[in-house]
Amino acid sequence: MKYVGMHSLIQRNNRLSVLMLLGFPAILLGAVWLFMATINYFSNTSGYDERGYSQNFLDTDTVNTSFMSVMPWVVGIVAIWFAIAYFSNTSMIRHAVKAEPLMRRDNPRVYNIVENLTMACGMPMPQINIVDDRQLNAFASGIDDKTYTVTVTTGLLDCLDDDELAGVIGHELTHIRNKDTRLLITSIVFVGIISTAMTLIVRLLWNHFLWGGNRRSSSDGKNNGLSFAVVMLVALVCAAIAYFFTLLTRFAISRKREFMADAGGAELCGNPLALASALRKISGDPGLKNVGREDIAQMYIVHPQALSGDSISGFFSRIFSTHPSTEERIRLLEQY
């Protein structure tokens, strides 16, 4: 078995992923500038046309000056928020899935498989966690050698034989070797920041309509400038645009790297057909029964909602999927 050009593909995907992640701050700051520019445009009038409509204009100098004064605050708040979420992700994930550390004495079979594979590829031994769940699942997480973790379910251990389990663990170890977990967690944190901002805007807008919708802001019976509701609507549109593009970026990172992890896992365990067989079994009952969080589900070896590639087809199905279709992954593995 030989994966021709695998390392060049890894390098190319790493470059693309870095460019994608650099786009997150640009998207966020772009949304802030768009919000300020929109408010400025509708606030500035240069008179009325012959039909009585106000003629608005954009004062870019004022927008840029205001943006430069606001940008350090935006960057600072996001940086602090990002740091807290980034460095506490391991404990949050373990708590969310109710995972417990696994030692050699607890399950020598699993521990030995992980140890042998890490020795074969010359990487440090990651933490092994186990979740008491009948569904079939495995995922890798962590941002450095101290936090890298491979998590498996009891259902997965019961259903797979040793060769299949080695293929799945090899897949997850490849995610760690390629720094996929660090990149995915980074993108998840950024999307979470924008998602939270959107939620806050929606709540403020809703409260305004409920409690402040009848207020007027002028002395002559007409609105003097933009109302709070209009401002919040503009903010919501800008945040929604930013959120849309960050979702596309995050999903593209995940899809590209699942193929690479399959290739690396098959090469590491030496049996691509075993990994294909494991994926086929996992696709019958994937996920975690008591965990309904989409951000964690994106790390699963098979996403629960990415199983039926034929039932939901087309461009939008592919672009919004965090994983490539399981059928396509199995087909590629069975070619070798």
Image (tube, grey):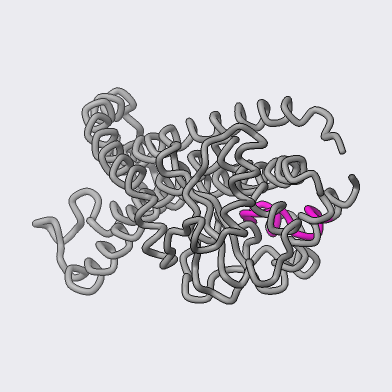
What is the x, y in percent for residue 25? 41, 34
Give the position of the N terminus as an image quadrant. Answer: top right
Quadrant for residue 9, please give it: top right
Q: Residue furthest front?
A: 105
Q: Is residue 298 above or below residue 182?
A: below
What is the x, y in percent for residue 13? 65, 32
Q: Which residues are magenta?
A: 317-330
Quadrant for residue 57, please give it: top left
What is the x, y in percent for residue 220? 12, 57
Q: Residue drawn at (52%, 36%), measured in percent from left and top?
A: 124
Quadrant for residue 118, please give it: top right
Q: Residue furthest left?
A: 219
Give the position of the C terminus as an image quadrant. Answer: top right
* Residue 319 magenta: yes
* Residue 163 magenta: no
| Residue nearest the viewer, comparing 90 with 28 | 90
Q: Residue drawn at (57%, 47%), measured in percent from left and top?
A: 248
| Residue nearest the viewer, comparing 13 with 121 | 121
Q: Is residue 307 above or below residue 145?
A: below
Q: Is residue 243 left or right of residue 310?
A: left
Residue 64 at least partly seen: yes
Q: Residue drawn at (61%, 30%), measured in percent from left and top?
A: 14
